[in-house]
Amino acid sequence: MNTKLTLSLDKDIIERSKIYAREHNVSLSSLVENLLLRIISEYKEGNDRKGSIVRELSGIVNLEGVDYKADHVKYLEEKYQ
């Protein structure tokens, strides 16, 4: 059963969202519903500890062999010369 919902959002976000929805042949209501569904399903699964952008970017950069402490010391030495 569908129920109406009134939201107050930034006008620019609404306009850009309408353009996106039109270009992808979906309704704005459908976009919002799918976003909310994704959020609550991730929450139920216990995956809300990290934001989705973190999950998407995890593992992209290989930092093997990087000496973080040495790099930080070098940065601090240069900063406080």
Image (cartoon, rainbow, N blue to C red):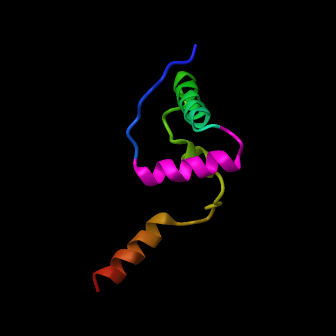
Query: Relative to 69, is 65 on the left or the right?
Result: right
Residue 13: image x %, image y %?
Answer: 47, 51
The quarter of the image holding the N terminus is top right
What's the residue at 52%, 66% (across, down)?
A: 67
Q: Residue at x 40, y 43 (%)?
A: 9
Residue 16 visible at all: yes
Residue 53: x, y in percent? 56, 48
Q: Residue at x 46, y 72 (%)?
A: 71
| Residue that sits furthest to the top in the current view | 1
**Could you tell me residue 79's position as x and y percent?**
32, 80
Residue 23: within the magenta?
yes
Looking at this view, name the residue that lies furthest to the right.
Answer: 25
Q: Position of residue 5 (x, y in %)?
A: 45, 26
Most frequent secondary structure within the magenta stretch: helix
Stretch in magenta: 10-26
Q: Does the segment drawn in magenta span residue 67?
A: no
Q: Which quarter of the figure has residue 44?
A: top right
- Classify residue 55 by image quadrant: top right
